[in-house]
Amino acid sequence: METRGSIEGVFLSSSKARSFRAQSSSALVFLCAAEGDVEDVEPGKIQVKSSESVLPYVGAACLGAVLFGYHLGVINGALEYLAKDLGFPENTVLQGWVVSALLAGATVGSFTGGSLADKFGRTKTFMLDAIPLTVGAFLCATAQSIETMIIGRLLSGIGIGISSAIVPLYISEISPTEIRGTLGSANQLFICIGILAALVAGLPLADNPLWWRTMFAVAVIPSVLLALGMAFSPESPRWLYQQGKISEAEFSVKRLYGKERVAEFMSDLDTAGQGSYEPEAGWFDLFSSRYRKVVSVGAALFLFQQFAGINAVVYYSTSVFRSAGVTSDVAASALVGAANVFGTTIASSLIYTIYKRRNKGSSNNHLCNPPPHPAAAMSRDSYLM
């Protein structure tokens, strides 16, 4: 129980610690996935029912990931056309503000998402998150000035920043053991799908210069669906248990996994919460000897990603292709987006396969203390850097 106690003490026990993990601890989450916990779950128990019952709720949460990718990529094809329509076609500084306002908002959202999720719960935070996502998309679609566009992008950024914290957190906490790895990688995959959708949505721009407004307006639909979907989704049993809402946690487990697993799940939560010391985590824990290696690896991966120029591709590939003389510039960007989805699918599969092989035969299967998929945890913030 010392391993579980130390891990939960840093990541799950106190409100501050849980917020820290949800907001910016990609490297530490990878360590959780690598080390695992010690709760055993009887393999194969009620697997089919659990897997099937949880998928609709994971799908609803993944709308947040789709919106994350869509708001990142929608500016790619639309920037030149909205700049002409709003009267700053030659002002690259203002164009840069339109692009970077989203990232500024996302920075704020990513630092507040975990705190909101700890205070109000995962599902309510999703519903709150739909407000800036919906309002931001509406303002961008109806903007008649650069100021309105920037405000809309800022609000959309806050929304996707919150999503970046709570989507992988919620998925990891509700996913059953037997498919947790697969579902854990869904966040990053759906981000890439959202980027691809935004690039494909720009194809009609050549024939309809005002289509950029429709591109932004489309984002309102999944934002509303996200709020509606989470209104009917069960709260995280782990969060409910931590709030002392035992009966509600049992009902949530029943909805997620079936009544056959309620006693097992609650017993695991009881065992995990007994007799463990709960120190608070802080930013300086990232530099302790325990985590120095994995933090260094994670930071190096992010650094090399930026050197690869991924952000320039996501935001400006259409302009780059146009400058290079490519006739079908938007279509070329869409192909880049498709390659991004393909590469993410391959990488996630490889990482999880290697992870399973390295942990084969260990006693780290656990039902109530879920480590997110390492690929999702390590890559979800790369587009914000």
Image (cartoon, grey):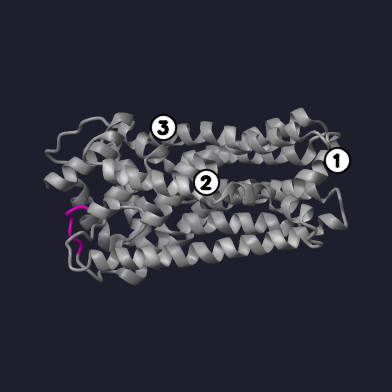
**Mark 2 crowd level (few <14, some 14–19, many ≥20, 10 Å Cα):** some
Q: Amino acid at mark 1?
A: Lys
Amino acid type, residue under disc 2 in the picture:
Gln
Q: Which residues are magenta?
A: 36-41
Asked which quadrant contains residue 353, the reply is bottom left
Q: Which residue is mark 3?
A: 115
Indicate the secondary structure of the residue bearing disc 1: helix
Q: Is residue 32 magenta?
A: no
Q: Are marks 3 and 1 in contact (CB under 8 Å)?
A: no
Q: Disc number at residue 342?
A: none
- Residue 315 in the image, given as x and y percentages of width and height: 66, 47
Circles 2 and 1, Cβ within 8 Å, touching? The answer is: no
Distance Cα–Cα, label 3 vs label 1: 40 Å
* Residue beneath the point at 82% across and 51% down: 211
Task: Residue under label 2, please give it.
Answer: 306
Q: CA separation, marks 2 and 1?
A: 30 Å
User: Which callout, 3 or 2, points at the residue further toward the start of the chain?
Assistant: 3
Pointer 3: residues within 10 angstroms few (<14), some, or many (20+)? many
Residue 372 pos. (x, y %): 35, 53
Q: Nearer the viewer, residue 170 or 96?
A: 96
Q: Earlier in the sequence, mark 3 or mark 1?
A: 1
> How many marks do you count on the picture?
3
* One can see residue 224 in this view: no
> Neighbour class for label 1 at 10 Å: few (<14), some, many (≥20)?
few
Circle on res. 84? 1
Q: Nearer the viewer, residue 306 or 383?
A: 306
Along the viewing direction, whichever of 118 and 193 lies nearer the viewer:
193
Q: Nearer the viewer, mark 3 or mark 2?
A: 2
- Closer to the chain start, of discs 2 and 1, is 1
